[in-house]
């Protein structure tokens, strides 16, 4: 889709979705030079955003509390295994496997998230732990079919700490990684 098409769609709908925004960013990043038409379309979009004719849809207006609970459990279990053996586990694979077998717990407010979190801890903690254990067992016993596969959003973090940092950046609100202090 071209910048002009995206802008026309946004003007027609009155919304600029995260996918539309990402596509415009991708085009701008990969193009060596934008045409005058593309600049004019971007100018129209900027004006429409400033006047409120087009509203940018926030990336997330809701969270799945189950993701947080599964990640907490998975981080704990993976750290134990990696500390006591030479096994390297992919935290994302483990979390995805478990999440695909657990009910989502969406919330749109902090109060709703706290409610979901407390109910899940009371009623689903055993199920969460069991699904994470099953995911780890499958991961440990699974041969590496496609070693060349590229993880979604891969930034090069092969350690558990790197994976946790990447997951936090993707899911934690206002997360900023602490930079290493120079000696």
Image (cartoon, grey):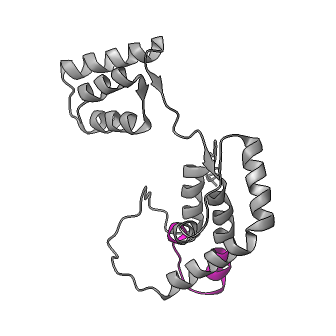
Q: Position of residue 171 (x, y in %)?
A: 59, 51
Position of the N terminus, as image quadrant, is: top left
State the residue at coordinates (44%, 61%).
156
Q: Position of residue 150 (x, y in %)?
A: 36, 65
Q: Is residue 28 magenta?
A: no
- Span colored in magenta: 76-93
Q: Position of residue 47 (x, y in %)?
A: 39, 13
Left or right: residue 171 versus residue 23 is: right
State the residue at coordinates (47%, 23%).
55
> Which image quadrant is residue 110 in?
top right
Nearer to us in this view, 142 or 153: 142
State the residue at coordinates (43%, 37%).
18
Left or right: residue 46 versus residue 58 is: left
- Residue 147 to residue 176: above or below: below
State the residue at coordinates (63%, 41%).
174
> Which image quadrant is residue 154 in?
bottom left
Left or right: residue 127 versus residue 102 is: right
Nearer to us in this view, 44 or 164: 44
Position of the C terminus, as image quadrant, is: bottom right
- Residue 82 to residue 67: above or below: below
């Amino acid at each position: 889709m071209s910048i002009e098409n995206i802008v026309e769609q946004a003007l027609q709908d009155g919304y600029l979705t995260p996918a539309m925004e990402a596509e415009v960013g991708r085009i701008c990043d990969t193009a060596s030079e934008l045409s005058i038409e593309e600049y004019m379309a971007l100018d129209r979009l900027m004006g429409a955003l400033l006047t409120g004719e087009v509203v940018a849809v926030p990336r997330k207006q809701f969270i799945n509390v189950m993701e947080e609970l599964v990640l907490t459990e998975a981080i704990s279990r993976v750290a134990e295994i990696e500390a006591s053996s030479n096994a390297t586990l992919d935290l994302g694979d483990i979390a995805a496997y478990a999440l695909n077998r657990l009910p989502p717990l969406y919330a749109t407010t902090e109060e709703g998230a706290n409610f979901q979190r407390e109910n899940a801890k009371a009623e689903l903690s055993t199920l969460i732990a069991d699904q994470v254990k099953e995911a780890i067992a499958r991961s440990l016993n699974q041969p590496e079919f496609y070693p060349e596969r590229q993880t979604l959003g891969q930034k090069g973090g092969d350690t558990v700490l790197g994976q946790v940092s990447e997951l936090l950046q993707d899911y934690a609100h206002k997360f900023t990684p602490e930079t290493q202090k120079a000696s």
